[in-house]
Image: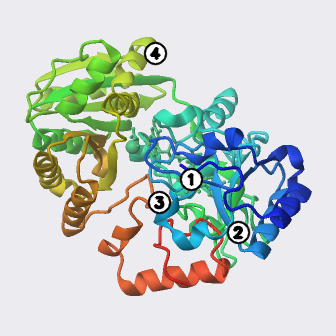
């Protein structure tokens, strides 16, 4: 990462940015910028001219006008926990044209206000920089809950979750972030402010900004605030850690759980190699007998206002299972969930030991194709000579494939993503396309589709200032 203070410098732009947000919130010093210029995985990152920290929508609009006038590239960033390189500038050589333009990172962390919880509507309006954990805490203080949860909850923000259409463990019950956004406010590339925070459950009045902006990964506008759905806070949650003989048995269990009507809150999957890694990382034995090399682990959560333990146990009793551990006490549950929650942390620690960032792919396939996908990924890892750590969200057929110490990541990506497309799956289930997979988007989107997406992008951002090269590859201008 090139962190020279003068890289891409532009004095008139700097003055305009200082006018917009004040000198304290224009970080030019290399030491102050550096934490924003590399992503969570350490795989992606590049130099910026400055990090800008707007605190109000008006200030952000002024920043966007200044950048648009100067043709400066804007990288929206918040928690910087994204895993596909969309929250940081590209590395210098990857984007010669863009490195000729000044690049600023716009940090949205200061948009951290939380409005009052509307219990009747079961909604709350929050700033884009509010973390998932603070959204959850605000909901819980009002006797409700947030419908989304995942391990990066203390850093990942609402704006980031909207931009990536984040998922996590509760999608089986409540859907992805797309289903939670009932209103949005955003600033476009030219400084226009669009959207509505009224949160009306029914409205058909022209373009629906949440539909357009959720999943747009900072390429169409910067989200400032959102009106979000809340869900009931359940009195009882039970967690089961289930060891099984095969993916086939795991899918049979999933089918039984779904048809039983049990109040499912999560159905997660951990492959044996991944379980070994996290067991070593935590320094604690697996809660249930570990599966064989061809087996798998499924973690099931049920939550309700009555105790759902008996329902869950009855369903498990009918399934073909090697071993099960059940936790109902919050402390025991938390300890059990750590085997799933701390997987990405365990992988990061292993990457540090190896001295090379892990190559991550987040994919989903129809459940009937899960076995084929896992076999292909395993074969690709074998051929490369690297270690495959796979886990994910079983109910959505969403697997995170982590290639530890991969020698030829591009080859693995071409092979695995090609197979995913052939199996009728998606090359990104919840992390986004980012810079990591822009070159592969054509596998699942037709040329017509990509042209139409580019046309929408150009209409809203004619100077291509917002995250160029993210989602859609940067072309010659
Ligand atoms: P950033 O990383 O800052 O940005 C992500 C993308 O959003 C970038 O393209 C950025 O330009 C854009 N962006 C950020 N803020 C805005 C804004 N206000 N307006 C417009 N664009 C914006 N993801 C899941 O979906 N499910 C998981 O289970 C999950 N688990 C994770 C566990 C760990 C340990 C880690 C490190 C990550 C995990 N992630 C998961 C990925 C990540 O946390 C999510 O993608 C999250 O939504 C990113 O939020 P963020 O605030 O960190 O965004
Ligand atoms: C998870 C992240 C990596 O599911 O998406 O843990
Ligand atoms: Zn995930």
Could you give the CA–CA distance between mark 1 and mark 3, rounded to whole angstroms?
8 Å
Residue 310 in view in this figure: no
Could you give the CA–CA distance between mark 2 and mark 3, rounded to whole angstroms?
19 Å
Dot 2: element: loop
Label 2 vs 3, first from the N-terminus = 2
What residue sits 27% from the left and 63% below the top?
A: 425
Please give left or right for residue 37 compared with residue 437 in the image: right
Q: Count numbered badges in the picture.
A: 4
- Front position among marks 2 and 3: 2
Could you give the CA–CA distance between mark 4 and mark 3, rounded to whole angstroms?
36 Å
Q: Where does the image place residue 228, in percent across and percent down from the top left?
A: 65, 49
The residue where tag 4 is placed is 330
Label 2 vs 4, first from the N-terminus = 2
Question: Is the residue indicated by label 3 positioned so its CB lies within 8 Å of ligand 1?
Answer: yes
What residue sits 62% from the left and 48% below the top?
A: 3
The residue where tag 3 is placed is 434
Residue in the foreground of this view, choosing between 95 and 348:
95
For residue 72, the mark is: 2
Could you give the CA–CA distance between mark 1 and mark 2, rounded to whole angstroms?
16 Å
Dot 1: element: loop
For residue 178, the mark is: none
- Front position among marks 2 and 4: 2
Residue in the foreground of this view, choosing between 231 and 69:
69
Label 1 vs 2, first from the N-terminus = 2
Residue in the foreground of this view, choosing between 262 and 343:
343
Question: Is the residue indicated by label 1 positioned so its CB lies within 8 Å of ligand 1?
Answer: yes
- Front position among marks 4 and 3: 3
Ligand 2, what quadrant? Answer: top left
Q: Tell me if mark 2 has few (under 14), some (14-19) or many (20+) residues whose alpha carbon lies within 10 angstroms of its own.
A: many
Asked whether the beta carbons under mark 2 and mark 4 sit within 8 Å of each other, the answer is: no
Q: Where does the image place residue 43, in percent across and percent down from the top left?
A: 43, 47
Asked whether the beta carbons under mark 1 and mark 3 sit within 8 Å of each other, the answer is: no
């Amino acid at each position: 990462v090139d962190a020279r203070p003068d890289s891409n410098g532009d004095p008139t732009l700097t003055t305009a940015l200082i006018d917009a947000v004040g000198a304290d919130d224009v970080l030019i010093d290399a030491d102050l910028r550096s934490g924003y210029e590399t992503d969570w995985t350490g795989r992606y990152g590049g130099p910026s001219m400055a990090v800008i920290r707007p605190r109000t929508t008006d200030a952000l609009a002024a920043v966007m006008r200044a950048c648009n006038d100067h043709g400066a590239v804007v990288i929206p960033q918040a928690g910087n926990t994204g895993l596909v390189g969309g929250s940081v500038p590209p590395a210098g050589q990857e984007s010669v044209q863009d490195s000729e333009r000044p690049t600023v990172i716009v940090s949205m962390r200061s948009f951290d206000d939380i409005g009052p919880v509307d219990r009747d509507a079961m909604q709350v309006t929050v700033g884009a920089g509010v973390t998932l954990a603070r959204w959850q805490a605000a909901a819980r203080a009002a006797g409700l809950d947030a419908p989304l949860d995942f391990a990066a909850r203390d850093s990942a923000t609402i704006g980031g979750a909207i931009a990536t259409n984040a998922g996590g463990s509760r999608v089986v019950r409540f859907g992805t972030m797309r289903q939670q956004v009932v209103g949005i406010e955003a600033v476009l590339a030219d400084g226009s402010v669009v959207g509505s925070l009224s949160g009306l459950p029914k409205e058909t009045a022209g373009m629906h900004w949440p539909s357009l902006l959720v999943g747009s990964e900072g390429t169409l506008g910067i989200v400032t605030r959102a009106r979000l759905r809340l869900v009931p806070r359940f009195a009882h949650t039970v967690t089961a850690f289930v060891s099984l003989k095969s993916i086939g048995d795991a899918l049979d269990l999933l089918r039984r759980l779904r048809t039983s009507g049990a109040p499912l809150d999560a159905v997660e999957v951990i492959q044996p190699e991944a379980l070994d890694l996290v067991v070593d990382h935590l320094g604690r034995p697996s809660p249930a007998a570990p599966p064989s090399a061809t087996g798998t682990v499924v973690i099931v959560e049920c939550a309700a206002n009555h105790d759902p333990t008996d329902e869950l146990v009855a369903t498990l009793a009918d399934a073909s299972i090697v071993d099960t551990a059940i936790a109902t006490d919050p402390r025991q549950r938390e300890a059990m969930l750590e085997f799933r929650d701390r997987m990405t942390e365990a992988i990061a620690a292993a990457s540090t030991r190896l001295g090379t960032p892990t190559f991550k792919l987040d994919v989903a396939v129809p459940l009937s194709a899960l076995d084929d996908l896992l076999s292909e990924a395993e074969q690709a890892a074998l051929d490369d000579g690297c270690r495959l750590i796979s886990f994910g969200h079983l109910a959505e057929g969403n697997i995170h494939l982590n290639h530890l110490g991969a020698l030829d990541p591009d080859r693995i990506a071409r092979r695995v993503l090609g197979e995913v497309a052939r199996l009728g799956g998606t090359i990104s289930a919840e992390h986004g396309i980012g810079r990591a997979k822009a070159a592969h988007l054509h596998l699942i989107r037709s040329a017509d589709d990509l042209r139409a997406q580019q046309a929408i992008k150009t209409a809203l951002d004619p100077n291509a200032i917002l995250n160029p090269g993210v989602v859609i590859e940067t072309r010659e201008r």
